[in-house]
Amino acid sequence: MEYWEAIEKINNPNDAAIYCSRVLKYGKTEDGVEYDKKIWGGDFWQSFKITHENPSKEGDCDDIAVAAAALLGDNGFPPYVLFYLVEAEKKGHLVFIYKDKNNRFGTIGGSYLDTCPPGTQSIETLIRNINFSKNAKRIEYNILDLRRGNRDYVEGDWDVNLLKD
């Protein structure tokens, strides 16, 4: 299946979550080095086309969040990703975030731990549930729109990282 066929076929968050957790692979290379460092030399947000056309279908959290945004973008879901840091952690994490028709937040990520169906919780509670940091005193987050800066997160060949602006 070509990347554009996946976009045409997948039309709801449940199917996108299944694709992201079963077809795509959350990447660490065989020698344990983080995927982006090994492949790109540093943090690099791949477009959906790059991730899908990679024979191993591998990426890290940002690549999978971008994939979910691309899969659902033609179905009325804005391409928003949630970047967050939890107190005492040294690096951030990224998931696709969306609202259902009842205005409840849900997320899609590279594993079942990152994927939360829509609920009534606040974003902070949602992050605690994803991250199992129920006791975290401080959470910092930002919701980013992948359309910002005219980045082609679906088919582009360049880094779509919004955190480098």
Image (cartoon, rainbow, N blue to C red):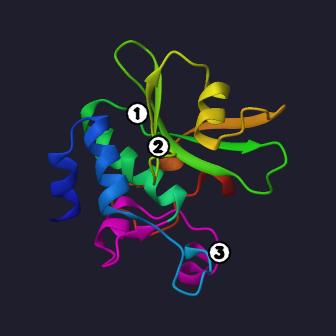
Q: Circle 3 is placed at which residue position?
A: 42
C-alpha span from label 3 to label 2 = 22 Å
On screen, residue 28 versus residue 67, left or right, reads right
Report the span colored magenta: 36-59
User: Hey, which residue is sitting farthest top in the picture?
Assistant: 102
Residue type for callout 3? Gly
Left/right placement of residue 74 relative to residue 160 reads left
Q: Amino acid at mark 2?
A: Arg
SS of the residue under disc 2: loop
Of labels 3 and 2, earlier in sequence is 3
Which one is in front, 44 or 29? Answer: 29
Q: Residues within 10 Å of mark 2 (few under 14, many from 20)?
A: some
Give the number of the disc on residue 78.
1
Q: Which mark is residue 147?
A: 2
Q: Is residue 32 above or below residue 84?
A: below
Indicate the amino acid at tag 1: Pro
Identity of the residue furthest to the bottom in this view: 31
Residue 32 among those drawn in magenta: no
Q: Secondary structure at mark 1?
A: loop
Label pair 2/1, CB-CB below 8 angstroms: yes
Q: Is residue 52 magenta?
A: yes
- Residue toward you, 36 or 90: 90
- The Cα atoms of the two marked residues, 2 and 1, are separated by 9 Å
